[in-house]
């Protein structure tokens, strides 16, 4: 009599890198719907003031996403991110003032290059710094750049900044992209019937949207790929990552330079859209606001800070100033109000507001697919 065959043990559920990436990846439907909604929003939104605020919020999306790829992924918390933003903005503004023959697109590339070089110079000595030491080091860089603008105030304008920066309408590519999308969405006749100010607002809106989608899309491809997992491993445990063969210096420095380059691009675009580069783009308040945005949306997810930027900036720039005149008279109170809001959010949702929402959407999608598969098998 033969013995009954022993039951084959059920293999453990895989938790390898591919499964981790699936768990971290946001809902793809949201990633497709959000840009589409933003693209056709001007067709249904008859409010150019609000549209201008959305364009500014779109640039803040790039500010927050560029901060997140460094601080949210590797854990190198940067309290001086405004240094890179201001560097890009002032590079574009100085070229516009002293080398007006340089095209807008080349000026933006110059801003990216100078900001990336600054990120490399700062990143090398900051490689071994952590926690408050890294925060103070990055914060001091932004403060030093503010002092430089006063030392060279003849060139930088000092407190007044550099006004008269060439706008996005002066760019061969940016103007064509903005006008083309405006005519596509609004219709050629409608666009032709707008006055000059409204046309500028629409072109600025579409240019910022296109640049944001390219930048955020690229950062998400990086963040949710293999290199993104490596960056997360550095944040979780540097020693374990190094023992596993991760070249810490290369990845940490690369994240620093990439973050600086993206911030420089966003800062330069901000200067072209607002036609000014001022000390506000180097201020500590801007760095703190970016951190608040990232933490509010959910740091370490790219899409979280992006959505957080729209919520915070639109509340700050449009609704709060109209709902409470005190915020318009005392802008510094807005940062305090959002700091209080952040504390409340982090108490309720320590990971920010976006990751839990994405998790629920993914869970609903999985349950729907499972129910559909069960019905098909009957």
Image: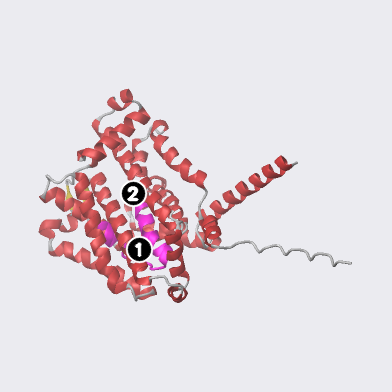
Residue at the right extreme?
Answer: 1
Q: What SS does tag 1 mark?
A: helix
Q: Which mark is residue 255?
A: 1
Choose top left, top right, bottom left or bottom right for residue 330: bottom left
Q: Nearer the viewer, residue 227 or 37?
A: 227
**Residue 335: within the magenta?**
no
Which residue matches tag 2?
59
State the extent of the magenta-drawn residues as a range. 60-86
Image coordinates for residue 20, horizontal then vertical, percent: 54, 60
Residue at horizontal 14 percent and vertical 46 percent from the top? 102
The image's colour scheme reads: secondary structure
Image coordinates for residue 97, horizontal then vertical, percent: 13, 49
Image coordinates for residue 220, horizontal then vertical, percent: 42, 53
Mark 1 vs 2, N-terminal side? 2
Residue at horizontal 57 percent and vertical 54 percent from the top? 359
Q: CA distance from mark 1 to mark 2?
A: 20 Å
Q: Main secondary structure of the magenta part?
A: helix
Residue 44 appears in the figure: yes
Q: Which mark is residue 7?
A: none
Q: Is residue 167 above or below residue 339?
A: above
Q: Is residue 92 above or below residue 192?
A: below
**Residue 72: within the magenta?**
yes
Q: Is residue 190 above or below residue 6?
A: above
Image coordinates for residue 120, horizontal then vertical, percent: 26, 66
Residue 326 appears in the figure: no
């Amino acid at each position: 009599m033969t013995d009954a065959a022993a039951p084959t043990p059920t293999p453990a559920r895989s938790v390898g890198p591919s499964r981790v990436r699936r768990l971290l990846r946001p809902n793809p439907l949201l990633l497709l719907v959000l840009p589409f909604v933003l693209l056709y929003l001007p067709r249904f939104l008859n409010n150019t003031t609000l549209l201008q605020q959305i364009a500014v919020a779109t640039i803040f999306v790039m500010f927050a996403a560029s901060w997140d790829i460094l601080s949210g992924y590797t854990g190198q918390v940067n309290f001086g991110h405004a240094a890179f933003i201001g560097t890009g903005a002032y590079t574009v503004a100085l070229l516009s003032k002293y080398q007006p023959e340089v095209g807008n697109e080349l000026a933006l590339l110059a801003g990216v290059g100078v900001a990336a070089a600054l990120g490399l110079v700062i990143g090398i000595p900051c490689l071994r710094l952590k926690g408050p030491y890294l925060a103070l080091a990055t914060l001091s860089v932004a403060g030093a750049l503010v002092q430089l603008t006063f030392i060279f105030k003849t060139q930088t304008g000092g407190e007044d900044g550099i006004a008269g920066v060439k706008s996005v309408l002066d760019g061969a590519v940016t103007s064509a992209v903005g006008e083309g999308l405006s005519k596509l969405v609004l219709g050629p006749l409608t666009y032709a019937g707008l006055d000059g100010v409204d046309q500028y607002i629409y072109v600025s809106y579409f240019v910022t949207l296109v640049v944001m989608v390219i930048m955020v899309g690229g950062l998400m491809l990086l963040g949710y790929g293999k290199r993104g997992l490596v960056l997360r491993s550095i944040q979780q445990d540097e020693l374990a990552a190094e023992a596993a063969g991760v070249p810490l210096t290369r990845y940490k420095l690369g994240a620093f330079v990439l973050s600086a380059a993206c911030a420089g691009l966003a800062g330069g675009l901000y200067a072209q859209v607002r036609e000014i580069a001022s000390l506000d783009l180097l201020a500590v308040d801007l760095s703190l606001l970016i951190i608040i945005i990232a933490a509010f949306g959910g740091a370490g997810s790219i899409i979280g800070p992006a959505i957080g930027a729209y919520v915070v900036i639109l509340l700050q720039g449009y609704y709060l100033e109209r709902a409470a005149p005190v915020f318009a008279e005392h802008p510094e109170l807005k940062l305090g109000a959002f700091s209080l809001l952040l504390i409340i959010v982090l108490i309720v949702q320590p990971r920010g507001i976006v990751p839990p929402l994405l998790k629920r959407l993914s869970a609903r999608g999985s349950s729907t697919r499972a129910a559909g598969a069960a019905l098909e098998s009957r």
